[in-house]
Amino acid sequence: MTVKKLLVSGGCLRPNGFELGEGKYYDRASLVLLDLQRGEFTEILSKSDGGANYPAEHPNQQYTAACLDGDILWLPTDTEILQYRLPELELLSCYSHPCFHNIHSVQVVGDELAVTSTGLDNVVLLDRATGAINRIINTQGLDPWHRFDAATDYRLVHSTRPHDSHPNYVFQLDGKLWVTRCSTEDAVCLEDVEQRIDLGEGEDISAHDGLWWGETLVFTRVDGMLILCDPVRKKVIENHDPFRLHRNRPKGWCRGLHIDGDMFYIGYSRLRKTNLKSKLRFLSQGNFKYGSGNNSLVVAYNMKQQKVDRVYESPEGMVDAIYGILPYTWD
């Protein structure tokens, strides 16, 4: 299937977000439709209001990595899982629990939804039909409440940083659930965290995603590299640089990936101020075209030909942070 349009989920920076502090960076969640032929970005859904499932002031509003199940879009915010019917974008349900904090992704797994409650270092498994919690799994193999209080409503808390593991994306390997962990630069099996893929190999790379390309697992690094892994040996095959033949490379926090055949659509969030300076060492690399920075990007990269096919830059203020990229097959 050749994709003609993409759904890009993310958020828009709050002008004084850095000054306000952690958990207050984004003031509007944005779901954007990207027409790959025309190169046009169109916002089709947004959210800026808070409510009972958010802090009373300065709610952090962003749509994170969503998933598709037929014509159903499961779309996360920091504290909610929203169910929409496509293409009408009819809101069908909203699931939210006090153990939700800084959600980074949701995945359909059989009759369940696997939700990465990143702020609590847990994966929460919900009944897909009712939203009820079936299980809470700590991503370090510990008790889910070894560090946090089960009686606290963490939806009302702006930040729980620093995160011990920062789980951000669930995928399946050998019929089991695995999760990508940013803080520990790896991916682990949720049934046995001793089963592990070392993604960083000693580097500070902030790994995200975890998608299949044929028989290869692919992850993103914030510096723009793609991590190609052998799922049998649980080893990194290659750190692949889509821009290695280019004099210029985008400036952006690389996260969000969709694979369509040999075409990789890679998200680059607009850079924001951060206290995590070690995560931005890659910015010291030579750069001319993007020297003054750029808005968020979606890069179309042909892995077979190893060539950047096209770079799509979003309009100013439409979507600054990109969390997820999905195919959109409706006209």
Image (spheres, rainbow, N blue to C red):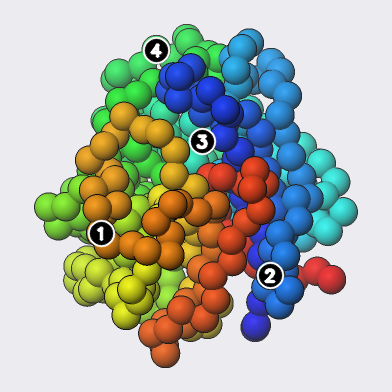
- Judged from this view, the residue extending furthest toward the bottom is 305
Label 3 and label 4: CA atoms lie apart by 18 Å
Q: Can you give x and y, in whole percent of width and height, for residue 235 in the image? A: 19, 67
Q: Which residue is mark 1?
A: 285
Q: Which residue is mark 3?
A: 103
Q: In the depicted view, which residue is nearer to us: 164 or 61?
A: 61
The mark that comes first in sequence, 3 or 4, is 3
Q: Which mark is residue 43?
A: none
| Kind of residue at badge 2 | Gly
Label 2 and label 4: CA atoms lie apart by 47 Å
Q: Which residue is mark 4?
A: 149
**Direction from residue 197 to residue 14 in the image, left or right:** right
Q: Residues within 10 Å of mark 2 (few under 14, many from 20)?
A: few
**Vertical comparison of 177 with 310: above or below:** above
- Which structural element holds mark 2? loop
Q: Nearer the viewer, mark 2 or mark 3?
A: 2
Q: Are marks 1 and 2 in contact (CB under 8 Å)?
A: no
Question: Image quadrant for the N terminus?
Answer: bottom right
Q: Which residue is mark 2?
A: 39
Label 2 and label 3: CA atoms lie apart by 29 Å
